[in-house]
């Protein structure tokens, strides 16, 4: 089976070769092209190219019909009618040029006859810088050279090495770009001073060139790069460290180079007979270094080995050397306490000389030094609450595993307490997207006292619950500007303060600024609208800090009537971080409004926030009410200061007094006294007697009423009452019973005195006024009750019972209809103002009457 496969493979290869040969024959079957002197020429040489047809391969037997054309690449350079063509060509470029001969017959396309490639090149230049190296005692000899310019022809390189005792080694490189060859031999140090000759020869079809070089074993031997490089530190101290490595035995010289990990230049050290170790004394603590080592066999001969692999290692820590940059803020909490916040920057790596484990912070009262607060923290800030009285100072130091730095002491003063030290005209200019330039003018009256400036900046609103970091930098007293770039971001607003320090005194000036800004992305969100004392009180939620896009300068509140088409009105509010409410007092009551807000930066105005509808109810205008009230009160006081008007007013008010303000006078007819002393006769008592000589408040005197009493026996019957008007005295009533003319039963058990008779008649008159009397109606007849009628607990008979039924219809006096009616001025129901009638005889004093607030009013 294997033989069959091999047979098929051989047959396939033969067929391929035959096809290639046949193709070549077919290409030039009509004729041939010859080139003289050669198809390979040097640059600038001329050639003759001939083209001829083979027998029976022309257009016809007549040669004049054959037209031969010679093409250079695709350009026709010569033509001839006949069976052959010859042309001379010059000025060919370096490289390969193709020439093609074609036959053109009448009425047919051109037919290719044959072609030729012309190679143009140069003789090889002499190789330069031939050198040979043997890497290590057991390495092989490798030689390198420089080829020179390109020949554009196929070139071979041959290396030949001749040594002592007629030793010869030769090797050829067929690569036209070859520039090194490994002879594959190893030279030994048996005769290190013996000479060796190496020769490199470059050859192509135009010629050859060579270059020899002579050297000794020590010249070409290059030691191997050192290995197993390491470093040790004595007592974990950077002050004493040793670099170790391994080398070949014949190495005499070493060179060391090292640099810090962030350095660009190397530190070089040359050592002789190091025997694989070297002490370094100038390394820095807690610094990462890179080390490399190279070796050489002879002081003057030979070459340096390659650099060893890099060794990277960090040196041990050392005691910190720098001092912390400390800053502080002081804030009043209440009338007894203040908050002192200390901030400090990290030491640089060269100052820290190790990993800082913690910071030691001390706060001490200067006066007396009794109050001392100490703390250890791993943060770069600390805060205390201390009494507001006293002067305080703080010290801060950093500590690592080797020790502590020198403490930084700072006196806590009021950073903005001295107005004369405040810088002037502080301004902010953007410097790209991540930096700003702060400029200021020195204090006008205390510029010479300034010892340094401190520029402090912090995000105005970070959008988080934690305080944004505080940044600062110090400038000398002659500076008037500072470039700040630490923690500066575009589209963020910063509060920047410039402090001028002079001993324990300081002054400051603050501004707001941003590195890059644009119009805010959204307006404030109105959260509540309410009415307070006739004004509209608006509350809003601040927009997120990321939507501010710079420093907000002010807010705008817009409002317009809901159903109106007028332009909206607005008011502007200067922006303050803590403000989230504002009142508007220019809205009209009982009108529906639509309100919204926007925010403005220096770049423009934000889109409007949410809309809120509000209806202002409105309240009484106190100004419009109070002013007329005061005027009316002044006028009334002026009027009532006159006695005449005061009296008239009292009369009017008395007439307007409501009924529920007075109590009804008890009915005298129901009293126990009336029962014990029966009345047998009703006597008419004219009212004019009661009204005469009525005393005034200015001249008090006893009221005397005269009356004539008659002893009568009580009778049961209905009285007949008549009224006759009497000029000047109102209405005088007269009542008589149907049986008054006769005498009734027996007389009272005892005789009544004249005074008792007077009181009896007066009670009779008073009893004639019922509780249901009304203005304009005559008084009701007096009702006489039997002696055994039940009494109340006060000794009076009930006054709310109906009158006894009468047996006769009372007659009406025709004069009643002509009686003048009493006029009431009260808008409330009131008791009757009909005057009582009393007899004109006898006298009745007021201390014998029991009267309430329902007394007669004149």
Image (tube, grey):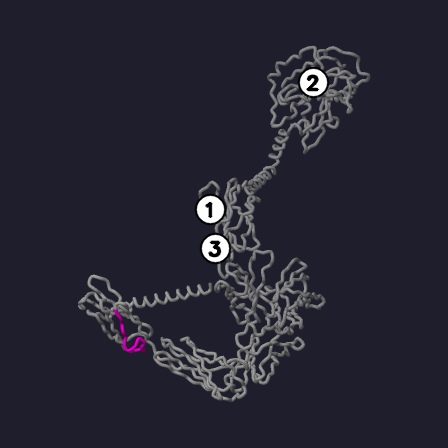
**Callout 2: SS:** loop
Q: Quadrant of residue 205?
A: bottom left
- Residue at image x 36%, y 67%? 17
**Callout 1: SS:** loop
**Callout 3: SS:** loop
Residue 323 placed where, x, y %? 62, 72
Q: Magenta span covers which residues?
A: 31-45
> Front-most of 247 and 647?
247
Mark 2, Cα crowd under 10 Å, few <14 / some 14-19 / many 20+, is many
Residue 579 placed where, x, y %? 56, 53
Against 607, residue 398 (above or below) is below
Give the residue pinned by disc 1.
568
- With 665 as the anchor, is 81 left or right in this view? left
In terms of sequence position, does the residue under pointer 2 or pointer 1 come before the other? 1
Whether residue 370 is visible here, answered yes or no, is: yes
Work out how far the residue at label 2 is from the one at label 1, CA to CA, in angstroms.
Answer: 86 Å
Against 307, residue 16 (above or below) is above
In terms of sequence position, does the residue under pointer 1 or pointer 3 come before the other? 3
> Front-most of 138 and 672?
138
Whether residue 841 is visible here, answered yes or no, is: no
Mark identifier at residue 519: 3
Q: Is residue 394 located in the magenta-colored stretch of the structure?
A: no
Query: Which dot, 2 or 3, sits closer to the camera?
Result: 3
Give the residue pinned by disc 2.
684
Query: Which dot, 1 or 3, sits closer to the camera?
Result: 3
- Residue at image x 53%, y 72%? 478
- Residue at image x 62%, y 16%? 816
Indicate the quadrant containing the C terminus: top left, top right, bottom left or bottom right: top right
Work out how far the residue at label 1 is from the one at label 3, CA to CA, in angstroms.
Answer: 21 Å
- With 338 as the anchor, is 251 left or right in this view? left
Residue 606 placed where, x, y %? 48, 52
């Amino acid at each position: 089976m294997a033989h069959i496969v091999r047979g098929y493979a051989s047959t396939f290869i033969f067929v391929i070769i035959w096809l290639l040969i046949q193709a070549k024959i077919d290409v030039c079957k009509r004729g041939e092209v010859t080139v003289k002197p050669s198809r390979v020429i040097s640059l600038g040489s001329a050639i003759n190219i001939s083209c001829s047809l083979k027998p029976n391969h022309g257009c016809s037997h007549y040669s004049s019909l054959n037209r031969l054309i010679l093409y250079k690449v695709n350009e026709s350079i010569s033509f001839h009618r006949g069976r052959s063509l010859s042309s001379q060509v010059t000025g060919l470029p370096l490289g390969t040029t193709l020439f093609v001969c074609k036959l053109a017959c009448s009425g047919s396309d051109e037919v290719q006859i044959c072609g030729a490639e012309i190679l143009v090149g140069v003789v090889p230049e002499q190789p330069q810088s031939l050198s040979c190296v043997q890497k290590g005692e057991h390495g092989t000899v490798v030689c390198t050279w420089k080829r020179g310019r390109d020949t554009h022809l196929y070139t071979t390189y041959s290396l030949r090495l001749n040594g002592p005792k007629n030793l010869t080694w030769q090797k050829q490189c067929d690569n036209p770009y070859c520039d090194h060859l490994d002879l594959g031999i190893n030279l030994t140090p048996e005769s290190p001073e013996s000479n060796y000759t190496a020769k490199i020869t470059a050859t192509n079809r135009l010629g050859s060139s060579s270059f020899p070089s002579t050297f000794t074993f020590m010249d070409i031997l290059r030691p191997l790069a050192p290995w197993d490089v390491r470093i040790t530190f004595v007592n974990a101290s950077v002050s004493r460290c040793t670099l170790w490595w391994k080398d070949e035995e014949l190495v005499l010289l070493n060179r060391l180079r090292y640099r810090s990990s962030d350095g660009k230049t190397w530190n070089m050290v040359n050592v002789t007979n190091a025997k694989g170790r070297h002490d370094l004394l100038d390394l820095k603590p807690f610094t990462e270094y890179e080390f490399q080592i190279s070796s050489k066999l002879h002081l003057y001969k030979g070459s340096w080995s390659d650099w060893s692999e890099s060794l990277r290692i960090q040196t041990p820590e050392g005691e910190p050397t720098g001092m912390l940059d400390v800053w502080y803020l002081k804030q009043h909490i209440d009338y007894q306490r203040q908050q002192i916040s200390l901030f400090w920057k990290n030491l640089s790596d060269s100052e820290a000389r190790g990993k800082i484990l913690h910071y030691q912070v001390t706060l001490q009262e200067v006066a007396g030094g009794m109050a001392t607060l100490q703390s250890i923290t791993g943060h770069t800030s600390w805060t205390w609450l201390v009494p507001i009285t006293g002067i305080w100072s703080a010290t801060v130091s950093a500590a690592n595993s080797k020790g502590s730095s020198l403490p930084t002491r700072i006196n806590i003063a009021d950073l903005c307490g001295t107005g004369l030290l405040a810088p002037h005209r502080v301004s902010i200019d953007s410097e790209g997207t991540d930096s700003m330039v702060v400029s200021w003018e020195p204090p006008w009256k205390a510029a010479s006292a300034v010892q340094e400036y401190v520029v402090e900046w912090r995000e105005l609103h970070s959008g988080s619950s934690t305080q944004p970091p505080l940044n600062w930098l110090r400038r000398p007293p002659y500076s008037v500007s500072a470039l700040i770039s630490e923690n500066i971001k575009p589209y963020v607003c910063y509060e920047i303060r410039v402090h001028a320090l002079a001993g324990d005194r300081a002054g400051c000036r603050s501004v707001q600024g941003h590195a890059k800004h644009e119009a805010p992305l959204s307006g404030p969100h109105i959260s509540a609208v309410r009415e307070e004392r006739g004004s509209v009180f608006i509350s809003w939620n601040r927009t997120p800090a990321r939507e501010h896009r710079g420093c907000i300068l002010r807010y705008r509140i817009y409002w317009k009537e809901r159903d109106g088409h007028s332009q909206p009105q607005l008011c502007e509010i200067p922006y303050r971080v803590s403000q989230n409410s504002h009142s508007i007092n220019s809205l009209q009551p009982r009108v529906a409004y639509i309100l919204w807000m926007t925010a403005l930066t220096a770049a423009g105005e934000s889109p409007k926030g949410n809309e809120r509808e509000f209806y202002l109810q409105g309240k009484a205008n106190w100004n419009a009410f109070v002013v007329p009230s005061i005027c009316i009160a002044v006028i009334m006081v002026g009027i009532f200061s006159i006695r005449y008007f005061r009296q008239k007013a009292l009369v009017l008010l008395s007439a307007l007094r409501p009924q529920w303000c007075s109590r009804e006078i008890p009915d005298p007819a129901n009293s126990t006294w009336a029962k014990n002393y029966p009345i047998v006769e009703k006597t008419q008592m004219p009212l004019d007697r009661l009204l005469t000589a009525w005393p005034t408040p200015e001249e008090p005197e006893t009221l005397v009423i005269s009356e004539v009493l008659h002893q009568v026996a009580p009778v049961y019957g209905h009285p007949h009452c008549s009224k006759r008007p009497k000029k000047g005295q109102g209405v005088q009533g007269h009542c008589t019973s149907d049986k008054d003319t006769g005498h009734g039963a027996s007389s009272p058990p005892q005789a009544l005195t004249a005074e008792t008779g007077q009181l009896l008649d007066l009670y009779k008159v008073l009893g004639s006024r019922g509780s249901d009397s009304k203005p304009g109606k005559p008084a009701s007849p007096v009702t006489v009750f039997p002696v055994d009628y039940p009494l109340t607990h006060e000794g009076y008979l009930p006054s709310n019972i109906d009158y006894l039924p009468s047996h006769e219809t009372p007659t009406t006096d025709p004069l009643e209809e002509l009686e003048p009616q009493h006029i009431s001025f009260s808008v409330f129901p009131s008791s009757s103002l009909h005057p009582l009638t009393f007899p004109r005889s006898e006298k009745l004093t007021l201390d014998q009457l029991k009267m309430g607030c329902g007394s007669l009013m004149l």
